[in-house]
Amino acid sequence: MSKLVQRIFRGFLQRRLYKQIMNDRNECATVIQSYLRRLFSKQTGWQLCRQQRANYEQFREEKTSRFFWYNKSNNVRSWDEPLEPYRPMVYSQSKRRWQFIMIANVHFGFS
């Protein structure tokens, strides 16, 4: 009878320890995920700010349907994609045309 009580008690302790370990793992995973989400959102914000301040803008030529890049600072048009950031054009499914991504009052707190 005493061995049965000991076995039940050990099982209870093992289950309690297992639950505690699983709770600790879940908390650690949550902390890591929230850190990575913050990091990725900051990187995306920095990238959007760089694109909005870029000298280059992407345009689409209607005749050939090819993209070209225009440098606003020196008024140069190029068919080669620049290495530095540029304001891209996207295709709007709702309007069925190419347009710029415009972000009003962009302030991410980055410099």
Image: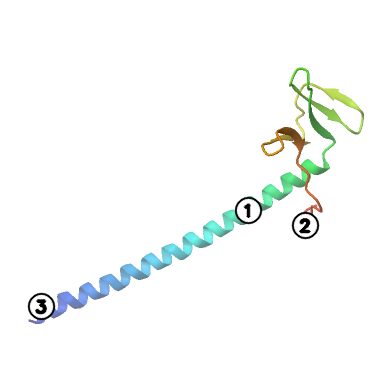
Label 1 sits on residue: 39
- The furthest residue to the front: 95
In the rendering, which numbered label is found on residue 3? 3
Residue at position x 74%, y 21% from top? 66
- Spatial CA span between label 1 and label 2: 14 Å
Give the Cα separation between the discs numbered 1 and 3: 54 Å
Residue 105 screen position, x and y as percent: 81, 53
Amino acid under label 2? Answer: Gly
* Quarter occupied by residue 5: bottom left
Along the horizontal axis of the image, is 95 left or right of 25? right
Q: Residue at x 74, y 45 (%)?
A: 48
Residue at mark 3 to residue at mark 2: CA–CA distance: 65 Å
24 up-or-down from 48: above or below: below
Q: Secondary structure at mark 1?
A: helix
In the rendered image, residue 14, in percent from the top left (x then y), is placed at 26, 71
Q: Are marks 1 and 2 in contact (CB under 8 Å)?
A: no
User: Of the numbered discs in the image, which one, if any, rests on residue 109?
Assistant: 2
How many neighbours does mark 1 have within 10 angstroms: few (below 14), some (14-19), or many (20 or more)? few
Quadrant assignment, res 37: bottom right
Which residue is outermost to the right?
74
The vertical placement of 17 against 98, above or below, is: below
Disc 3 residue type (three-letter): Lys
Contact, CB < 8 Å: mark 3 with mark 2? no
Instruction: Kindly indicate the quadrant of the structure image that contains residue 89.
Output: top right
Q: Residues within 10 Å of mark 2 (few under 14, many from 20)?
A: few
